[in-house]
Structures are given as structure tokens and as C-alpha cells.
Amino acid sequence: VDGIIVAQAFHWMATVDTLEEAYRVLTPYSPLVLIWNTYDYSYDWLRQIDDQVLSKAYSPGVPRQQTGQWEDCFKTTVGGTLFSMVHKWQGNYKQVGDEDMIVGRVMSTSVIVEKSPEEKAHVEDIVR
């Protein structure tokens, strides 16, 4: 395999076992690329949505990209031997949309999608 790209998901499988398997299938010097879209919490309304809805939706122990815990597997002896951080990049892309787009984005978050219809309706009410 000449490269592995994991978008919006590595935090769900961030273990040394995952790194060992990726290393096993990659050809030498091939990249493991991890991508996340993140919210810009400099906007108060986004921070409020996270505080009131998203952060509360995660049960203790459920992985979340924002905590940075996904990096821990790379800091182990094995993880640090298999992979090194060659490049870490953060870009900015401003997504512009109306209320329905924002509600749709929040409702598509994995921990919201798995909720009951009643819980989803409550989340939507809070976001609106």
C-alpha cells in the first residue's frame, strides 16, 4: 500500500495495534495521513453548541478528536518507532451557511446520529 488516509475517524481506532497494522501494509516511507475538520471555537456561538450539546453527548471513555488522546499511541515506544510526525498542518476554511446547514452539521456528528429520535429532536431544539 502506497499510503493510508484516515479522515474524521482515527480517534476511534488510535491504538498501537492499529499503528502496527498500518506499518505492516505500507510500503517503506509511505505516509499515514490523518485528517479532521474542526470547529473554530473563537466564535462564541460554536463554543456554546459544543458546551451545551456536543461535549455532553460523549460518554466517558468515548474517543474525541478534540481531546488529543489519539496522539498517545504515537508517543509509545512502539508507535514512536514505527511512525514519526513529519508534518503537522492546520489550515483554515470558512464554511458559510444558514441555520439549517449548521443544524445539519451538528446532527450529522456520530454521537448525535446514534441517539433516539426524541434525543435528536431535543438536540435540534437546543441548536436552533
Image: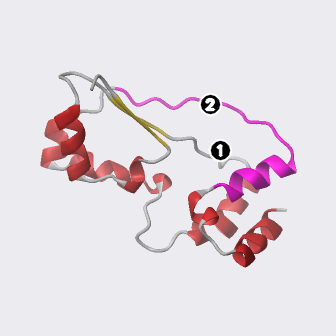
Residue 92 numbered tag: 2
Q: Position of residue 71 (x, y in %)?
A: 33, 48
Task: Report the front residue among 3 and 15.
Answer: 3
- Examine the rendered structure and indicate whether residue 59 appears above or below residue 87: below
Taking 35 as reference, is 112 left or right?
right
Taking 57 as reference, is 94 left or right?
right
Image point 66% across, 75% down: which residue? Answer: 116
Residue pointed to by mark 1: 40
Task: Report the front residue among 88 and 60.
Answer: 60
Looking at this view, name the residue that lies furthest to the bottom. Answer: 118
For the residue labelled by badge 1, is the local secondary structure a helix, a strand or a loop?
loop
Image point 51% across, 41% down: which residue? Answer: 36
Q: Are marks 2 and 1 in contact (CB under 8 Å)?
A: yes
Q: CA distance from mark 2 to mark 1?
A: 9 Å
Q: Position of residue 123 (x, y in %)?
A: 74, 69
For the residue labelled by badge 2, is the local secondary structure a helix, a strand or a loop?
loop
